[in-house]
Amino acid sequence: MAERLLRLADVAKPGRLRDPTRTVFAMCGIVGYAGPKSAVDLVVEGLRRLEYRGYDSAGVSVVADGELSVAKRAGKLVNLEKELAETPLPVSGLAIGHTRWATHGGPTDVNAHPHRSSNGRVAVVHNGIIENFAVLRAELAEAGITPVSATDTEIAAQLLGLEVAKGGDLTGALRTVCNRLEGAFTLVAVDCEQPDTVVAARRNSPLVVGLGDGENFLASDVAAFIGHTREAVELGQDQIVTITATTFEVETFTGEPATVRPYHVSWDLSAAEKGGFDWFMRKEIYEQPKAVADTLLGRQDESGALRLDELRIAPEELRAVDKIVVIACGTSFYAGMVAKYAIEHWTRVPCEVELASEFRYRDPIVGPTTLVVTISQSGETADTLMAIRHAREQKARVLAICNTNGSTIPRESDAVIYTHAGPEIGVASTKGFLTQLVACYLLALYLAQVRGTKFGDEIALLIEELEKIPAAIERQLADMDGVLQLASDFAESPSVLFLGRHVGYPVALEGALKLKELAYIHAEGFAAGELKHGPIALIEDQLPVFVVMPPPGRDLVHEKVISNIAEIRARGARTIVLAEEDDLDAVRHADVVIALPKVPTLLQPLVAIVPLQVFACELATRKGHDVDQPRNLAKSVTVE
Ligand code: AGP
């Protein structure tokens, strides 16, 4: 009999207010500015907004009075700010800045960006990896140029310095250099002899233009400038942008004018703040009801039929689809695992789920009648981007489920379903995951509607069930004291297991991943039916095991999981069972029950994951970890 039944009770208390402790590795942050204000101040402010991307050094460069000036320091942004306070840079309306995640060369002052050319003409900041930098470095040596740093970025700066010295403009010079580089790069450059211009180029690494009133910005993420403008343009693959305070022009790497699509960033600065919570992650867990509701908004026409505006794949093409392949990484991959159950059950189309990093290396069978569905919160994950490029080469149609408007993956897909979770700053995905699930359900239902495998009224009923989810999650979040207590009980556990069956299996995997990436302890998710094939050997006295219980009475799986619980309890495990509110079987067999709202079987992941997110976040904060920027992790893994 469960000793404690964690039922819906009093209001949860947001986490304690704590300052972020330390910043660890993640992707680089880039900011550029051209305008009438103090460029250094705006660039440093932008770098501060990108702090969540993590870094190990930071720097800024300005052009003033025909001179380039650079300040850069290893360590936190505050080190650079101290340097600037002690030795201010010249006043200028033109600057570029960078926070670095080391790839080539350790995190030192010398290796920090911006990098300057030996002839003093240009300064460059870079995000990505230049794969042929060694060859180019040797070429520079032959020309008598010895770089001072160990970075691939400085190679680009030296090449650019040589190019502009030939007399061309900075845009043409950068185009020439980009056509010699291999790999992934966003490069942003200034030239002391072109004091009104910032030029940038991108390949496989994000860059967005902020269009202000008499000022323009460049950044790796809109968070850097949305305090100043919300009008943005996402740069496309192999494109170069030239900005001044009042103009911006985009062209291809071959010099032709490029068409770009301006968009309005609906996220304002406050949305990117913590809103009173101690961590972005905790804030984003509590934003989930709204994120789910926002993702459901506007998805039906006046007749009640599903309408996915950005889908841009004709219904007859969708009817011709004979296989669906879902491709993603990490948490997004687990969302794809849930999608498989819904897609196959509602549409009867075979659906495979693939890890993006494995997909293109296994010689997959995809073709014109394959629908590839890629899931990515950031829209910039390199593994996923490379996988869909491979799929498109095989003539498959690609549909992206993404949370970041204008990012690379949706731009390189045939169609997109945007989730509307708002900015997800915490590296560990929470609302991103939940809204991915919602988008997957919507896609499955839309396919069922187009292919006629579900009647309109059946689809409407399921939409109604989805529309109840935000309130269900609100109720759960109002009753987290018991889960917070569990985090205290298990704060010193060296290992935690997670079991699930059917759609509970991906939930178990995601629950384990949350604990791994936040608390840095061993956590593993299993299909409950696999226990007897080996993992049961892991069970020992007092080992915490979370079990995601399928809803009772709907098929045999419920009884089988009850047997699994009995097996592990008999061997001393402490069983924490997530079960529907009136699942008396679960109460009889578990040590602790976490009550879940009653929802349709396939929708259960939407509510089952919430207590596991809260548990992992709370346990990690009790261990003193930075849950927004866990060690070694990046919010967007833009390198393969
Ligand atoms: C999830 O908590 C992790 N941050 C990570 O697994 C993430 O889901 C993965 O890197 C995929 O990122 P994406 O959704 O932005 O493509």
Image: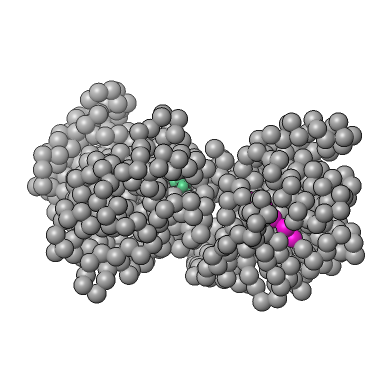
Quarter of the figure with the C terminus: top right
The quadrant in which residue 192 appears is bottom right
- Seen at 74% across and 60% down, the residue is 198
Q: Is residue 181 left or right of residue 398?
A: right
- Seen at 71% across and 61% down, the residue is 242
**Does the magenta-highlighted stretch encompass residue 498?**
no
Q: Is residue 436 left or right of residue 214?
A: left
* Vertical position of residue 65 compared to residue 354: above or below: below
Q: Write the start and end of the magenta stretch as one range.
A: 198-202
The quadrant in which residue 259 appears is bottom right
State whether residue 490 appears in this view.
no
Q: Relative to the observer, which residue lies in front, 419 or 513?
A: 419
What is the basis of the colouring in this image?
Answer: one colour
- Seen at 84% across and 38% down, the residue is 148
Where's residue 393, x and y in %? 45, 40
- Seen at 21% across and 72% down, the residue is 303
**Mostly what secondary structure, the magenta segment?**
strand
* Vertical position of residue 160 compared to residue 288: above or below: above
The quadrant in which residue 290 appears is bottom left
Q: How many marks?
A: 0
Where's residue 260, x and y in %? 57, 62
Q: Relative to the observer, which residue lies in front, 273 or 478?
A: 273
Q: Relative to the observer, which residue lies in front, 312 or 217?
A: 312
Quarter of the figure with the N terminus: top left
Where's residue 345, x and y in %? 19, 47
State whether residue 352 appears in this view.
yes
Where's residue 40, x and y in %? 76, 64
